[in-house]
Amino acid sequence: MAAARGKTQRRRTATHESFLRHGRFLFLRAALILCAAAITAYILQKPIPRPSGGTALGYVLGTIGALLIVWLALLGIRKRAITAGHYSLKAWVSAHVYLGLSLIVVATLHTGFQFGWNVHTLAYGLMLLVIVSGAIGVWAYATLPRTLSDNRGETTRKQMLAQIASLDEQILEAAQPLSRQNADIVRLSLEETDLGGGFWRRLLARYGDCANGQALSKIGGALRGASGPEAVALAKVEDLMQRKAEALALARRQMHITAMLEAWLFVHVPATFALLAALTAHIVSVFLYW
């Protein structure tokens, strides 16, 4: 029984282990060894007339780099298969991150620091773009889910939307005694409030033109000149609209964080396909024209 508990504990530890720490930084160590070997070989070589992709070491490093790029691009396919052990998705992602970063060293040494306005440098530049966007993705998935959870608290997305809908119903009911002019202000909040909007609006969190905010401001002005039952109804509507504004802010922050999690993919994925195309052109041109 003690052995069984020990196995269970190890499984729990493995489950909660970050992909960056997978296997006690196994793939970080592998990436460092690869970089150290590439740097050592580069220093010890005696190229004629100068280091470049056309030397023996250049071809070796180029082959390693090309194979790594193709393998790294297969992560999207790998995500669709769920396995455990040495070839688990967590292990694959860990290798993807660290070996992807090692490409900076491998590919740079492959070039021999020879750059120009050509397809070879284009492939190198796209590779750096893919790596940088990938690094941003790693940061996003390492930090933003906790922010997302902290912002949401115990409230689910469905509950957020239900709360806003409930407040709309309460606002509509509280607005029944209002004059036609003030009822039109309430209608602005009920009918024209945009919860999220398009991707860029959610990403930039630009809601300065929020219809509920405009209506709340107008209701505040109307309340200052009102009296009697109208003032009582306006005060209740104002309180409900303020609560709606808080609920909208919470939901929009949630959408903003989610958009940030998605944003890096709009660069990383297209840049990866462009890199594969440029890499193909680079390899074909080398073997056909050099």
Image: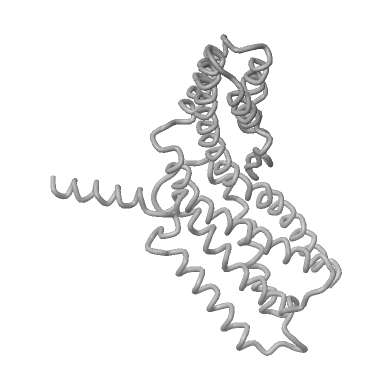
Q: Would residue 71 be seen by someone viewing this image from the given angle?
A: no
Question: Who is closer to the viewer here, 152 or 116?
Answer: 152
Question: Who is closer to the viewer here, 66 or 200?
Answer: 200
| Residue 198, position as x, y percentages in the image | 68, 35
Question: Who is closer to the viewer here, 139 or 228?
Answer: 228
Residue placed at 35% from the left, 50% from the top?
Answer: 16
Question: Which quarter of the figure is the N terminus placed in?
Answer: top left
Farthest residue toward the top? Answer: 177
| Quadrant of res 44 | bottom right
Question: Which quarter of the figure is the C terminus placed in?
Answer: bottom right
Considering only vertical position in the picture, is 233 above or below 77? above
Considering only vertical position in the picture, is 257 above or below 284? above
Residue placed at 41% from the left, 54% from the top?
Answer: 18
| Quadrant of res 69 | bottom right
Q: Is residue 216 left or right of residue 126?
A: left
| Residue 261, position as x, y percentages in the image | 57, 46
Here the colouring is one colour
**Total number of numbered discs in the rendering:** 0
Q: Is residue 284 left or right of residue 260?
A: right
Considering only vertical position in the picture, is 129 above or below 249? below
Residue placed at 65% from the left, 45% from the top?
Answer: 204
Considering only vertical position in the picture, is 155 above or below 129? above
| Residue 253, position as x, y percentages in the image | 54, 40
| Residue 182, position as x, y percentages in the image | 64, 17
Q: Would residue 31 be seen by someone viewing this image from the given angle?
A: yes
Question: Who is closer to the viewer here, 289 or 174?
Answer: 174
Residue placed at 56% from the left, 41% from the top?
Answer: 258
